[in-house]
Image: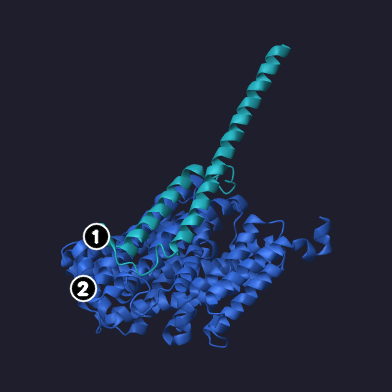
Amino acid sequence: MSGWILGIGTVYLCMLVTAALRARKSNHSDNDFLLAGSSLGSLVGCLTVAATLFSTFTLMGMPDLFRNHGIGAWIFLGVSDCALAFVALWFGINIRRRISADNFNGFSDWLGRAYRGRHATYVYLFGIFVFLIPYVAIQIKGVSLFLNSIMPGVMPSWAWSVSIVSVILAYSELGGLKAIIFADAVQGLVLFGATIVIAISCVAYFGGIGPMFDSIESTSPALLSTPGPSGLFTYQFLIASFLAIAMIPVTQPQMSTRLIIMRDSSSLARMAVLLAIFSFVLVLATLPIGLYGAALYPTSATGEFIAQVLVYDQSPIVAAVVVVGLIAAAISTADSQLFALGNELRSGVSKPQYQSLRLMRSAIVIFALSALVVSLVSNTHIVLLARTSFAGSALLAPMILSAVFFPKQLHRAIPLLVGLCLILFLASIFGLIGDTFWGLRMDLVMFIAVTFGTAIILMFKNHYLPDERKSS
Amino acid sequence: MPDRLKDESKIETLTRMNFKSNKHQHRSFWWRVCCGIAIALSAITFTPLVIGDHASRIFHLPYLLAVGLILAIAFIAITIAGTFFYPKSLDRGDKK
C-alpha cells in the first residue's frame, strides 16, 4: 500500500505544483490573485465550494457519527447540507445585488462601510478568527494523527503537520486563489470518488440495502431512530446544527467570497444545484460506511475504526486514494480558510496604503503558523472551539443579513449585540457561565437572542439613529 | 412621423414594458414561493412527523431515513426551481 500512496501522492503533489505555477503565470493583477479573476464557472464553482465545505470530517467524522449515533446523522448533515445549497443560491443572488465582484475587497471592509463604523469590521474579524483558526488546526491535527497511525514508521505526527502546512503555504503564496480553486476541484473529485467506492463495498458486504438495515435492526435498533443510542440527536441539537450549517454561506468568508466571484448569476444558480446534488450523494455515501462499522467494529475507538474501514478493509489502490484524498481534504479546507482570513484581515485594515498583497501574504503565513502551533498544543478547549466553530460563526449571520437586506436601517447597536453574544457564547464554551439557559442549549439561546435583538433594533432604528443620519 | 403612428409606437412600447414588468413580477412571486417552501421544509424537518421513535419502514428504509431523504430531495427540487425564478434584476454583481 505504501507504494501506491507514494505514487498517487506524488501525482497529487505534481498537480498542485503545476497548478500553482500556471496560476502564478496567469495572475496579472491583485484581483486575479485574490479573487481568481472573478469568473468562476458552475462546475468548478461547485467543486471548490464543496471541497471547502467538506473537510476531513466528511470521511472521518460522518461515518463515525452514523456508527455511534445512528441515522439521525442524516438529518444532522444530509438535510442541512441540501438546505445550505438553497441558502447559497438565495444569499448569493442577494449579496451580488449589493456587491460587485469588481469592487469587492472583502467582507470586513464591506461591513465597515455598510455600518459606517469600524466596530462591525472588528466584530466580524473577531468572530471568524476565534472560530476558524481552531477549526483549521483540528483539520491538520486530525489528518496528521491518522497518517501517523497508518504509517507509524515514516515520520512523527508533528512532522506530518509541518509538511501539510508547508504545502499549503507554498502553493497559496505562489498561485493565490486560482491555485487553491484548482486544488479544491481535484480534492472534490478524489473525495467523492473514494467515498462512493468504499460505500459500495460496504453495502456489498451486507448483501444489499434492505439486508443492511435488517442486520442493524437485529443488533442495534436504537441506531435506526432519533435520538440514537446515546441520545445525541435531540430536537435542540438538530435545530441548532441545522441553523449553524445552513448559515455557512452567509457567515464563512471562504464560502461567501466564492459566491461573489462566480461568473454570473446563472453560473451561481447552476452551482447551487450541483452543490445540492453533490452534498446529497456524498453524505448519503457515508451512511453505509458507518453502519458497516456498527456491524463490524461497534466498540472500537474512532481512530481504529476509521483506519480499518478506510484503509485495511480496502484494496491497496483504494486505500491509497483514500489516504491522499484525506490529505487533500485537509489541505483544501485549511488553505481556503487561511486565504480567506488573510484577505479579510487585509480588507479590514483601515488605511488604504496598508491594504497591500504583501500584508495579506504575511497574514496567511502568520495564520498558518498559528494554526500549526494550535494543532500541536491543542487542548480540550481548542477542540471545543473547533467543534462549535459553525455555531459560533453563525451568530454573525443577522449582522451580515441586515447589511444585505436593510442597508438604510443599520445601526451600530447590531454589531455590538453580535459581539456581546459572541463573548457570552465563548464564555459558555470555556465554562465561565452555564451551557444551558432555561433548558435551552447556549448556542440556540444566543442565536435566538441575536436574531430577535437585531430585528428589534431594525424596527426601532429611528429612535437610535444619530442626528446626522436622521436628517439624511 | 404622423400622430397615429406615434401613438401606436407609444402603445407598443408601453405594452412591451408592461409585459416585461408582469414577467418580472411573475418571477418575483414564484421566487418568493420557493423561499416560502424552503422555510416550510425547514420547519417540517423538526416536527414529530420526521423526528421521533418511528419503527415502520418505507421501501426497506427506516422511516426516519426515508422521510429525511424525501426532505433532502425536496430541498434539491426547490433549489432547481429557484434557478428558474430567481429575480434577474438583482444581478449587479454579474461581470459585464
Q: Is residue A230 above or below residue A347?
A: below
For residue A383, side relative to residue A290 (left or right): right
Please say whether residue A84 is visible from this viewpoint.
Answer: no
Quadrant for the C terminus of chain A, please: bottom right
Tell me what residue is drawn at x 46 percent, y 51 percent. A40
For residue B25, side relative to residue A297 (left or right): right
Q: Colour of chain A?
A: blue
Q: Residue B44 at what x, y percent from top left? A: 45, 60
Tell me what residue is drawn at x 24 percent, y 79 percent. A298
Label ID, residue A218 = 2
- Report helix, strand or loop for mark 2: helix
Q: Residue A166 at what x, y percent from top left? A: 41, 74
What separation in Å lies between label 1 and label 2 (alpha carbons)?
14 Å
For residue B78, side relative to residue A404 (left or right): left
Q: Residue B86 at what x, y percent from top left? A: 52, 45
- Report helix, strand or loop for mark 1: loop
Q: Is residue A261 above or below residue A359?
A: above
Q: Are marks 1 and 2 on the same chain?
A: no
For residue A431, side relative to residue A68 (left or right): right
Q: Chain of mark 1?
A: B
Please name the amino acid that badge 1 sits on: His
Is mark 1 in CB contact (under 8 Å) with mark 2?
Answer: no
Tell me what residue is drawn at x 30 percent, y 79 percent. A146
Q: Colour of chain B?
A: cyan
Q: Chain of mark 2?
A: A
Label ID, residue B60 = 1
Q: Residues within 10 Å of mark 1 (few under 14, many from 20)?
A: some
Q: Residue A359 at what x, y percent from top left? A: 58, 70
